[in-house]
Image (spheres, helix red, strand yellow):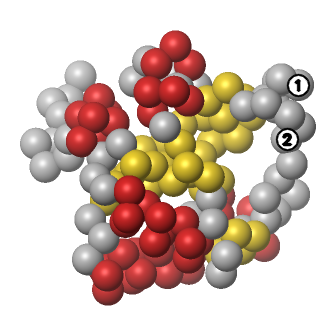
Amino acid sequence: MSPRNPDRPSPGRIDREWPHQVALPDDICTDRNFTLIRAFCEERGLKHHIRKVQAVWPDRRYQDMRLYCFADRASAELFQARFGGEFFDPKRDREGGRVEGAWKRQGVWTRLLESGPLKVPVILRD
């Protein structure tokens, strides 16, 4: 096993110190969208970390989600107002409260192809 990068905090530390998290579908955060998100955060000085979680619905459908993690609620709200997404509470939403637990969702899965100015790239659409 390779040693952890000292510049990147552990998943548990991110959940403790950057608990205000916004979830977006992973495939919507790629390509030009990644650049849009990065520029938005840099221009506003929004320091954050990125984690992933697998969302699982009752019908056993699942989707990889990218979590944008902020130390303060105001930064998370600013991000969510621009890009959409859902607030994610790592203590409440992770299965069993585990650091690597899945996100057990309710209701029916529907694929999100757009969120705010973000769109899933054509090549990644079904």
Spot occupied by residue 100 in the image (x, y as percentages of width and height): 45, 24
Residue 69 appears at what percent x and percent y? 38, 51
Q: In the displayed image of the protein, which residue is found farthest to the front?
A: 74
Gap in Å between the C-alphas at discs 2 and 1? Answer: 8 Å
Examine the image and state in which quarter residue 33 appears.
bottom right
The structure residue drawn at horizontal position 62% and vertical position 59%, both measured from the top left corner, is 85
- Position of the N terminus by quadrant: top left
Q: Quadrant of residue 107?
A: top right
Tally of numbered discs: 2
Picture residue at 39% right of the left edge, 82% below the top: 39
Q: Say if residue 26 shows up in the picture.
A: no
Please tell me how crowded label 1 is: few (under 14), some (14-19), or many (20+) other residues with Cα within 10 Å.
few
Which residue was labeled with disc 2? Answer: 109
Q: Is residue 77 above or below residue 10?
A: below
Which is nearer the N-term, disc 2 or disc 1?
1
**Residue topped by disc 1:** 59
* Residue type at tag 2: Trp
